[in-house]
Image (cartoon, rainbow, N blue to C red):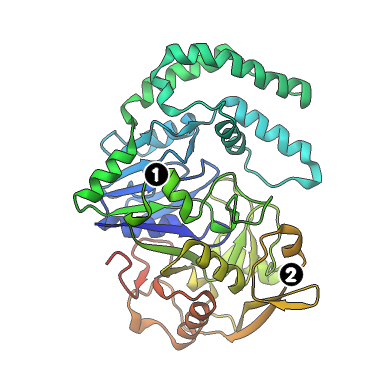
Amino acid sequence: MPAYAVIGAQWGDEGKGKIIDFLAENAAIIARYSGGNNAGHTVINDAGTFKLHLVPSGICWPHTMNVIGNGVVVDPEVLLKEISENKLDPSRLAVSDRAHLIMPYHIVLDKLEEAKRGDAAIGTTGRGVGPAYVDKVSRQGLRVGELLDPEDLALRLPEIVAFKNEIITKIYGGEPVDLDDIFALINKWASDLAPYIRPVENLIADALDNDGKVIVEGAQGALLDLDHGTYPFVTSSNPTVGGTLTGLGMGPRSYGGVAGVYKAYCTRVGAGPFPTELHGEEAEQIRVQAGEFGTTTGRARRIGWFDGVAGRYSARVNGFDAMIITKLDILDGWDEIKVCVAYEIDGVRTDQFPVDAATLDRAKPIYETIQGWTESTRAITKPEQLNDGARAYIKKLEELVGVPTKILSTGPRREETLVLEDFLA
């Protein structure tokens, strides 16, 4: 069986967790490939409400193996807390031995660096994700598998901690981290995580070879991609489809489909350009009704109309062959709904998305107005229940993005889902 990727198509927070939980019924493996606990997925089903940060969103199905790939950076404290809260054993969760560790000094440095930026702050979550990726690239990182080799860690760690403390104290004026405290943490992590650590690329390959469906779970969104997003206001990894290959050790021929998850409008957390951003009463109405506050940070999300220029760019970069639209019901009852169809930049109309932040910041959205609908789409599960106004809106989004819609999310719960076409066929 092929693998299927489910990727955030905007600035994150598109509702991927709910979609993964819905699709996982027919999956052997749910695999996370990038980011760290700066991401958050909320899953609501008959078993309760689950707020996940590292553990993949397939944990509520007893038959799925959930995999954390080598492209993820792992804070063991966060992971162990999620394992405990969700009562996960090694038959349900595997962590790549090649994934990099978020260490206490990464969290300290993340907060100090963001504070130092002042008004130019990027809006990081302060979880140590960026500094952990920096160490990965500079070859100073520690990998999950090294927890099983304490003798090697005992040789490497003192030099690394001394170097980090030089930066913390002399550049940022912060308090140094304690080497003995870190060793104590590592011993605890090694004991508690050892049963979960393994080469996960073998698990995925075996599942695919034995006709098991693998669903690859994105974190953050494509417009926050380190290479293809609105740099420098991006995350530290690759949420786009390319990150799935490097972050899980998969080949491009593994895929049977790549779906982009789009909200029926747009949101963004943190700093950075946001052409369709709304302010005032309209933004607050959507924010409150939709509960647009971050799962990880609790921060209020910025709100905007659907951006067709950004949406089409995301589809092109990722090669989407399916669109999954979430939170359609939030637009119920609006008299008119705006959709961005192009930008005006320095007096020139364009339908191209500039990832250069300074240029995008000058982009003025050109809108088309779509007539709203009064009928509720909340919790509908059958195509014949979809009203004409909502159909017209979905058709407009498909025209702009250039990808057919296969699934609609009509509420936060697993069953509040309308399948127009089977994405996993």
Q: Amino acid at mark 2?
A: Ala
Horizontally, is 9 left or right of 59 in the view?
right
Alpha carbons under labels 1 and 2: distance apart: 36 Å
Picture layout, residue 229 above or below residue 314: above
Residue at image coords 64%, 68%: 353
Q: Which residue is mark 2?
A: 363
**Viewer-proximal residue, 72 or 178?**
72
Q: Residue furthest left?
A: 210
* Residue 406 placement (x, y as % from top left): 38, 72
Q: Residues within 10 Å of mark 2 (few under 14, many from 20)?
A: many
Question: Is the Cβ of the residue at disc 1 closer than 8 Å to that at disc 2?
Answer: no
- The earlier-in-sequence mark between 1 and 2 is 1
Foreground disc of the pair 1, 2: 1
**Is disc 2 placed on a helix, strand or loop?**
loop
Residue annotated with mark 1: 248
Task: Identify which amino acid the numbered label 1 is placed on.
Answer: Leu
Residue at 80 percent across and 73 percent down: it is 346
Q: Residue 325 placed where, x, y %? A: 46, 69
| 187, 352: nearer the viewer | 352
Residue at 55%, 60% in the rendered image: 291
Left/right placement of residue 115 relative to residue 244 reads right
Please, is residue 207 above or below residue 393 in the view?
above
Quadrant of the drawing holding the C terminus: bottom left
Name which residue lies at 52% across and 62% down. Answer: 317
Picture quadrant where residue 23 is located: bottom left
Secondary structure, mark 1, is: helix
Tell me: 309 left or right of 68.
Answer: right
